[in-house]
Image (cartoon, coloured by chain):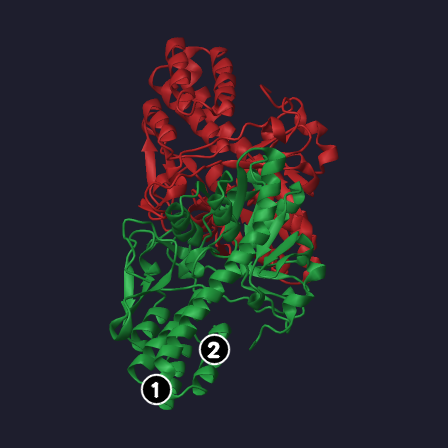
Chain colours: A green, B red
Amino acid sequence: MPARDRTQPFTRTIWWEGDGSDAAVVVIDQRRLPREATVARWGTVADAADGIRSMQVRGAPLIGVAAAHGIALAMRAEPEDAALDAACELLAATRPTAVNLRWALDRIAADLRGVAPGDRAVHARRLADATAEADVAACRRIGRAGLEVLRDVHERTGGPVQVLTHCNAGWLACVELGTALAPVYLACAERLPIHVWVSETRPRNQGAALTTWELGQGGVPHTLVVDNAAGHLLTTGQVDVVIVGADRIAANGDVANKVGTYLKALAARDVGVPFLVAAPASTFDPDCPNGAAIPIEERAEDEVLLVNGAPIAPEGTRARNWAFDVTPSRLVDGYLTDRGRVTAAELGPMLTGHRGA
Amino acid sequence: MPARDRTQPFTRTIWWEGDGSDAAVVVIDQRRLPREATVARWGTVADAADGIRSMQVRGAPLIGVAAAHGIALAMRAEPEDAALDAACELLAATRPTAVNLRWALDRIAADLRGVAPGDRAVHARRLADATAEADVAACRRIGRAGLEVLRDVHERTGGPVQVLTHCNAGWLACVELGTALAPVYLACAERLPIHVWVSETRPRNQGAALTTWELGQGGVPHTLVVDNAAGHLLTTGQVDVVIVGADRIAANGDVANKVGTYLKALAARDVGVPFLVAAPASTFDPDCPNGAAIPIEERAEDEVLLVNGAPIAPEGTRARNWAFDVTPSRLVDGYLTDRGRVTAAELGPMLTGHRGA
């Protein structure tokens, strides 16, 4: 990809700048959003590992793609087996709880070991590009599955389609398009009138900081609300469809996603508005029977107690900080996947064959 | 009341310091909470009006009591009819949308006009004290109605009673005890083990800033969570009862309260945990048939866009900011009132005779 025209807004998270031996991997440095939109350049696998570890890039799909680019940088510098093993170890250790990252690296390493060292640099770059394009293609299929729903709403109402989302499940978490926001971007591309309600997503405010920013880059009309406002929006007829992403989906369709998702699902059901979960097949976990079996990460209490570094509560106040909640499948009206739109009863095909495939 | 012992924590919002012609009304300056616990002293009706207008004191019950104290200060300085009328006008204009404030002032003025000017200073102070004590008594009756519920929980579980609340409906909004938190304080007084989950209550964070502080002053164990966490707490069995206050309750029992209340009511119902609304009779509005007839105030978008004065979203982001939502009566398991605990079907007695009484 040539150096991007910086007068254009960003709508992609990772790309190559230049060709050959001095090509660099460029990523949007998400740590600085929304205050500054700057990029970071990675010339070595160490740069890539630092970037993943320090959360220049985040979001499970993007982390996997970024690691593939890290391997390409490693093979360009030194294509022998020892260097390949070292690069995989280095990258896998950046986010030790990201199981998907380890799988992605294992697949790439197995593929590269079947290639002569002299050909590995070229092959590794092709693999990185293929990984990125596969993510874009999966998001595009998710987007098409949701686009049908948005078109139906517009045909019925004749007005702008009102979407409520939570957290950030957009292109900033992927390569392009995103998961929950993919239908929104495809709708915009075909000039379907649309407006997104962005829930701020305390405690880390990914909605306020990231989703607003990426929708702005994409030219999508949007409005920020506090998480508490979802019920009022829904009961007053200001939402046509709720679309969220997922961190893990159990075999019975229960969804672990950013804390607060379950409250939106309840309110959507109470007023009869469709609640949709957008996720690629890799998010479905056949080994997890239901939501009760999904471990819920608890994070540092300072994420609750401090906003922009300043305290919001009296000194000495204690807080608890669960990162996710579980939305039972009975509240999910549909799953937007890279294999189409399905109901909980139709989840079977999502649950086989995607690990290690 | 003598000058309070400052080594004791605060558990009351307003009191007299000294007697006779140089007595002052003392209030906790709530604008500085939770950073600083300081008091403001009012020596004149102008001080009282400034204090109410600038939100040194807040909460409908407390504003009414504070205004009665303002009239007492006015009558001490100048007891003639013209001064009485001027004081009422001054105080009523401090919070023009507070209908209860106007009613309270009308009642006090009518009472004082029946008293000779020479006796008005003494009578006005008695009225102010009676207004405060009536509020304390109402909160105590609300507390007793809820205490029965908490005792039942403890008898059933044998463990600490886990209460989830929203916003601030405690003694900081009243004179002592509060509404939603009155049962909690009475439970603590009789050493019932109890723990309160405090929802931070974006956008103004009254839970994080005020409820945590007042529970700390009262020595009540509590933990702060983000508003998004209510569902996870409820589905994982960490809440025995949800108790919230109310801004207005319609004739059919629908409740307007701080935005986000409806989401908690939905989650409580989904898991079968009692959802209780605590409010004095004056909160029940017989002229309002149902929740759809309650106007929902929309406030400045900067309350959403800025936290501690710093932006949380990209420059130019637009926000909407509804202060309340409506919880339908079908989700309310009981109303804790100064006339006992009632269901929606039993609301009749709350709906008559309290205005202008």
Report helix, strand or loop for mark 1: helix
Report helix, strand or loop for mark 2: helix
Q: Name the residue under label 2.
A: A102
Q: Which of the chains bears the disc numbered 2?
A: A
- Residue A141: in sight, yes or no? yes
| Image coords of residue B274 (percent x, y) | 67, 49
Q: Name the residue under label 1.
A: A118
Looking at the image, tell me whether mark 1 or mark 2 is earlier in sequence order: 2
A130 and A40: which is toward the camera: A130
Residue type at mark 1 is Gly
Q: How far apart are marks 1 and 2 (CA)?
A: 25 Å
- Residue B179: in sight, yes or no? no
Please give left or right for residue B333 compared with residue A169 in the image: right
Q: Residue B143, located in which quarter of the rendered image?
A: top right
Q: Residue visible at 45% across and 10% down?
A: B116
Q: Residue visible at 58% across and 38% down?
A: A154
- Which of label 1 and label 2 is nearer to you? 1
| Image coords of residue A175 (percent x, y) | 43, 61
Question: 10 Å neighbourhood of mark 1: few (<14), some, or many (≥20)?
Answer: few
Q: Residue visible at 59% across and 41% down?
A: A240
